[in-house]
Image (cartoon, rainbow, N blue to C red):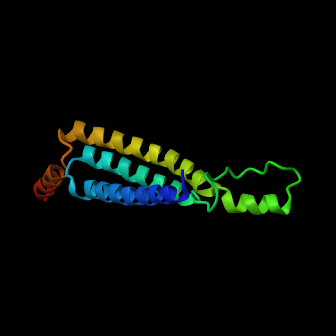
Amino acid sequence: MMPDMARFVYNSLIVILVFNTAISLYGILARPSLVKKLIALTIFSDSLNSFAILVGYRLCKGFEQPVPPIVTRIPPTQEHISKLIATAVDPLPQALVLTAIVISLAVLAFLAALTLRIYYVSGTTDARSLALMRARAAVEGE
């Protein structure tokens, strides 16, 4: 890829991820169904994980592709270290995203089980109906 084309793709991906995050936030905040909220939460976490990976990616001047952060010459020369620093992809966001994927999987599995349990108990996953049921139960309990 040419450097200008790479920058265009990079900037386009940032715009797409921001748009995707905004749509998923709308789904989390505005949709009444708990299942739709769960799907939007999944899209939200995937968008943020993709954004974190994109932050760690480095657009290199004069090089086609960034390189993995691996020292291939032992002992490395000062020139080799300088080139590695200029072109290596940052591994920290990748490690953080792997951790975030595992944590979000556990949280989403818990929320899916909780949504199923709510459906079995109340017969609906609509948050507005659940709020009305809870208000009626509170009034009747007084």
- The residue located at (87%, 50%) in the rendering is 74
> In the figure, residue 121 lies in which quadrant?
top left
- Which residue occupies 35% across, 57% down? 21
Q: Is residue 51 left or right of residue 96?
A: left
Residue 73 locus on image (x, y percent): 84, 50
Which sits in the foreground, 42 or 51?
A: 51
Q: Position of residue 18 (x, y in %)?
A: 37, 60
- Which is more toward the observer, 104 or 92? 92
Please, which residue is most extreme toward the right here? 75
> In the image, is 43 to the left or to the right of 94?
left
| Residue 23 occupies quadrant | bottom left
Q: Which of 101 and 93 lies nearest the eye of the viewer?
A: 93
Give the image location of residue 124, x and y in percent: 18, 41
Q: Is residue 74 left or right of residue 111?
A: right
Q: In which quadrant is the C terminus drawn?
A: bottom left
Image spot of residue 133 (x, y percent):
14, 50
Which residue sits at x=48%, y=53%? Answer: 49
Which residue does the image show at 79% across and 60% down from the upper left? 81
Q: Nearer the viewer, residue 131 or 3?
A: 3
